[in-house]
Image (cartoon, coloured by chain):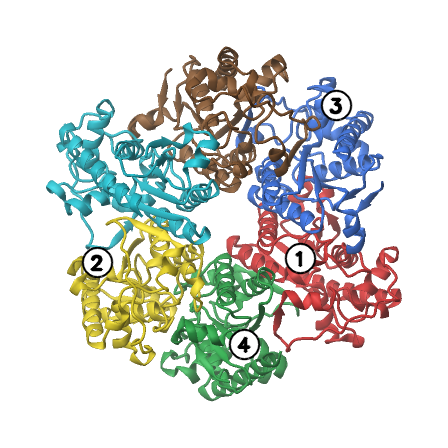
Chain colours: A red, B green, C yellow, D cyan, E brown, F blue
Amino acid sequence: MTTYRWAELTRERLGALLPQAWVVLPVGATEQHGPHLPTGTDALVVDAVVAAAATTPTGRDLVVAPTLPFGASDHHFPFGGTLSLRVETMTEVLLDLARSVHAAGGRRLFVVNGHGGNRGPCHSAAQRAATAHPGLRVAYADYWELLLADAGPDPGGTPVPGHAGAFETSLVAHLRPELVCDLSDRPGPAAAPGPRAVTVHEQESWTRIDGFTDRPATAGADAGRQWFDACVAALAARLTALARS
Amino acid sequence: MTTYRWAELTRERLGALLPQAWVVLPVGATEQHGPHLPTGTDALVVDAVVAAAATTPTGRDLVVAPTLPFGASDHHFPFGGTLSLRVETMTEVLLDLARSVHAAGGRRLFVVNGHGGNRGPCHSAAQRAATAHPGLRVAYADYWELLLADAGPDPGGTPVPGHAGAFETSLVAHLRPELVCDLSDRPGPAAAPGPRAVTVHEQESWTRIDGFTDRPATAGADAGRQWFDACVAALAARLTALARS
Amino acid sequence: MTTYRWAELTRERLGALLPQAWVVLPVGATEQHGPHLPTGTDALVVDAVVAAAATTPTGRDLVVAPTLPFGASDHHFPFGGTLSLRVETMTEVLLDLARSVHAAGGRRLFVVNGHGGNRGPCHSAAQRAATAHPGLRVAYADYWELLLADAGPDPGGTPVPGHAGAFETSLVAHLRPELVCDLSDRPGPAAAPGPRAVTVHEQESWTRIDGFTDRPATAGADAGRQWFDACVAALAARLTALARS
Amino acid sequence: MTTYRWAELTRERLGALLPQAWVVLPVGATEQHGPHLPTGTDALVVDAVVAAAATTPTGRDLVVAPTLPFGASDHHFPFGGTLSLRVETMTEVLLDLARSVHAAGGRRLFVVNGHGGNRGPCHSAAQRAATAHPGLRVAYADYWELLLADAGPDPGGTPVPGHAGAFETSLVAHLRPELVCDLSDRPGPAAAPGPRAVTVHEQESWTRIDGFTDRPATAGADAGRQWFDACVAALAARLTALARS
Amino acid sequence: MTTYRWAELTRERLGALLPQAWVVLPVGATEQHGPHLPTGTDALVVDAVVAAAATTPTGRDLVVAPTLPFGASDHHFPFGGTLSLRVETMTEVLLDLARSVHAAGGRRLFVVNGHGGNRGPCHSAAQRAATAHPGLRVAYADYWELLLADAGPDPGGTPVPGHAGAFETSLVAHLRPELVCDLSDRPGPAAAPGPRAVTVHEQESWTRIDGFTDRPATAGADAGRQWFDACVAALAARLTALARS
Amino acid sequence: MTTYRWAELTRERLGALLPQAWVVLPVGATEQHGPHLPTGTDALVVDAVVAAAATTPTGRDLVVAPTLPFGASDHHFPFGGTLSLRVETMTEVLLDLARSVHAAGGRRLFVVNGHGGNRGPCHSAAQRAATAHPGLRVAYADYWELLLADAGPDPGGTPVPGHAGAFETSLVAHLRPELVCDLSDRPGPAAAPGPRAVTVHEQESWTRIDGFTDRPATAGADAGRQWFDACVAALAARLTALARS
């Protein structure tokens, strides 16, 4: 029971592993994260969370696919700095990768998502892939939802995940502190949450808050380490549960 | 502050109402619901929940669009009786309807969904519509998730929503009792839930349980009425909250 | 030999009926119909015509699918009040439903169309479905063309179907009189017909006539009842002819 | 008032002509036409009909676009010899050409179609093009429907158009006699017409009649010449009528 | 070993020929070619080159498909006179035709392209067709690249192919001299080549040079005949090489 | 004049750089590379070549986008180990990224491709992007073609690029020697080249040679270093040339 990188293996090695292994596909985004975080935030966080969680012994081989560095982020175009796949392109990308896993002999794919804008594509692609490829099981989770499911909403009073707020800023401060810009002179906007269990999309809602939520200035590397460890633990628990199925 | 049916109004009446009103679009499905429920279950339930909730005085006009009777249900094809739009078609349908609302002068659309297989299309279409049409606000909710958000998971020990299990069977027994077939001689299968906050798609998982979950034989019209009222109340609360925004 | 509603049947009942039955799919639209008719005109008329014709004993079971309330109506956007699927979306919807009928064991599908803008999608989807699903027979008709084929062009001097003119206004005055607004002070425009057997599309041609044709003020419930009965008889004759094939 | 070939003109010449001229686009097919006709039948007939009709003085310049030699013919694949565009590709091709006419300054496009399988694409593309390009008028006709509109159904007892039957065989016998194979030992199948004003698509219906209708052995060059002249006259009449609009 | 025209053959004849023959599909364009050349230049040149080369005895039957007169030319829209398929439509057209060849029993398709804007579609369609249809071999070449491969870059100091420059102008002067307009008063622009082996796309680069390259005024029918013969010889050599494989 | 990583910059930094900088997008693939090379070969090579070349002082800022680790590789499915985007998905991905660069204020994008199967998508996307976004310049090159343009075909008698042959094996032996498996007991197949300047696609051609070309056993890290340096130099020369334009 080992963890492998798909890209480092030969076709023969993959052919032997895939019928039993879980393939894990980290999915990120490259998009504006306020004036203080790097545009690669989502990709680097999900990549790191998956890499750490995948070291957990689960009783079944894991094969980690290359992290997809792009996501569906058109709604961030007005702020610049965003490399986005349209929602429909993103869906096809995920579907094609699921199809590839099946074609290569894989039977279990876990899409671990790091960007809210990818929810539609992840749901749609997982559903289509399972229908198109009987015998393929496709699991999908947003990494922060695992945390929320374990810790309850607003753990420690911080909105999770927000966007480029205290949560994500802390994670980057932990993982790549040199990429976080000074925040001292930018008071954070107040994000107005919508009704519970309702998702509200509105382009202007991003502009009103200058593209980031809550209070990034309260972030810190220590909090980031704790968040990170909690996310890794939450994901590791799912990897273990799935490994048994 | 009144509730209207889009299809019953002239273009002039709609032109006057839409800039301020919330448009509510109920989205259903026509698909197998076990050997005991009508294939139109999802459409008739969401249609009834929206119709009842829309009578709530919210302080803002509501315009209820025609219920879309079809959803993304390809995964139910093996059982027969299913009229399904592919996931990608369903996404385009919802996007086109959102675009239409905007073209007609509407600025607020609330998609109320009655079928789990529509989640991807709803997320994707809402996100794309908001990006394509600045000034348009698109809210989306699964009606049962509103209930769960208010009542907590497994209210009364019944899996919500399940599929054609005790929850949905009770709702149909309340709304259209003549359409529920006798269940006495069919023991219900045990549905194996996946890890929390992980969505798992697998075609065979439906076959293993003969296309329905938990224990429909325990359903009843009284429970159905209580579920129905709770769903209506949960939706009415969101309509009220959105009316203020 | 009975008439059923697809949405009211269980999968088992449908599985037994579909190999021999004709499935009838009414296809409507929700679009501006001048300042005097409800936007749901096309859907409510075709729904009523099919419902009435389907009571004819034809010697073969009929299964009536849920009426599709939306059609391809982008050309009516400039007038407001229009919920439209793009032509390409509409085509995919019809194709998906035909595919669903086949997947459910059906071998005969009759698309009865109530909106001129759906002709391209109906032709295209029927042709694609028949090619994709050998063994499936797909018939398609515009309900008013059946009338014209039986009664000759311009029956009684009224353009059929026109758009929101005397023909449709009479039908709604018969079926849902409370939804027809007063017409007394709006003289009807003169519609300029194109060369025979040539279809001409031009966006501005709609604007020039304020979105409706001929003389709606001459409409009446009595004429509507006669038109309606004639349409029902024409459709019933085709159902009978198809039932024998 | 002259007739031009688009492909032979420079951009400058086209730029001067297009704002006032009618552009005529002949649309054909390359598909099996029984054991006796060339696969290019539909393209060569429509090309010849348009070329002849376009010499009529109509009072307005005509610009004839290159004949599209391919159409939507997937339903003829089982017989071999068929170069087909899928229905959806064909639709996009026609839409793109209409868009091109508009981009080049054209305001009037007449699609003259020579193949029954193109009806869906022609309707859909004309409708979409007119909506997408205000100011563009798109007319569409099947050349044989013009004949039927003028001469009534079954002129002379011959089914028009049929497929590779007496009508088309006569036309090719007139236009390219060297391409018609001897028919003496192949009795023609009887084509079973469907109910009036109903279009029926069924893959097997083609196989049952070996891919051609009625009695090609009764065809002849003299009849072909008469049919051809009648089709040319019918089209010329429409060109004249459209030239006035 | 003979050369045939697909459109002139019956399905039976094609059914016998296609399993062994090479099918050749000439692909052109209809687009502005400066103020001096006809918009049909690319189609007429590739049609003529293929027709001439196809007379070469290669030891294997050739079946020449109808020339596709349209290509991907959106970048020429600003100059007028252009009938263009979008890149994605063009790709589907070529894919559909390759699929048709396979469905008709063909196993060898050679796409001979006459327009630079078709490179993406040709590459993509050939690759997709070969993957979708095992047993089908799809070859693709730009006719001028064959010349360059044999003669080296800039043969005789003339940029090949350029666009409506000395090379193409000479070819048309040879093939259809009556279609070339007088060039004496239009000095040719200097085309700035990009770095070797890098393809650079930029809309404005066309505008800067008024839509044509190098020095068309230096063109002549004699040079055109030599170029033409060289292109035919280069293509004939490939037909011969492919005939052996 | 500096080289940056897009993902490490904030939106503000990118907003300042992009109007003048060249954005470089490395495009790879994850696909079988014989029994001896890692499936990530194409992505790791192009990533390394770009990273090294981008350190060249060119007089203009470079912003290196995240390497796309997936390409169009369906033709390698039969061998396993392949994560492929369909050709059409790959095209949309590249188009979306070009669109993103433009939306973010970029005016110069250079797509550096590391996989032969991406040629169609790269050509198509570059062409479409330039047409859709006037003001955007899109350059595209296959890194090995730059080498061939500078060094001539078959430099040193080794086929370039081949697939998993001596060229690529040497490059991986130089860059990641630990990922190259022992080759001693697998004689290399002889790859049969097609006619010059003709691209031939045939699924079975890959099976016949077990998915790799020429003689990987002759590869070595020294040769790999030399190839690598030559590729880097060739790319650096183009970056310099483009920086001036």
Q: Chain under label 2?
A: C
Q: Which mark is residue B20?
A: 4
Check if mark 1 and mark 3 are on a common chain: no
User: In the rendered image of this protein, does residue D124 appear above or below residue E66?
Assistant: below
Residue nearest the viewer, comparing C110 with D119:
D119
Is residue D145 left or right of C8 when viewed as pictured? left
Residue closer to the observer: B172 or F236: F236
The numbered mark at residue A73 is 1
The answer to whether any part of residue B31 appears in the image is no
In the displayed structure, does residue F233 sit left or right of residue B100? Answer: right
Where residue C231 sits: x, y (%)? 21, 66
- In front: label 4 or label 1: 4
Asked whether the residues under the numbered discs 1 and 2 touch, taking CB atoms below 8 Å apart as contact, a structural biologist would say no
Amino acid type, label 2: Leu
- Nearest the eye: A97 or C216: C216
Would you say the residues marked 1 and 3 are in contact, meaning their CB atoms lie under 8 Å apart?
A: no
Q: Residue at x 19, y 47 (%)?
A: D149
Say few, some or many: other residues with alpha carbon within 10 Å of mark 3 (under 14 / 14 to 19 / 20 or more). Answer: some
Discs 1 and 2 carry the same chain letter: no
Would you name the residue on which mark 2 appears?
Answer: C242
Q: Secondary structure at mark 3?
A: helix
Q: At 41% from the left edge and 75% from the top edge, which residue is drawn?
A: B37
Nearest to the observer: residue F202 or residue D241: D241
Q: Look at mark 3 in the image and give the residue it sits on.
A: F218
Q: CA distance from mark 2 to mark 3?
A: 72 Å
Badge 4 local density, few (<14 within 10 Å), some, or many (20+)?
A: some
Hey, what amino acid is under mark 4? Gln
Residue at x 41% of width, y 48% of height: D136
Query: In the image, A184: left or right of D154?
Result: right
Q: SS class of the residue under badge 1?
A: loop
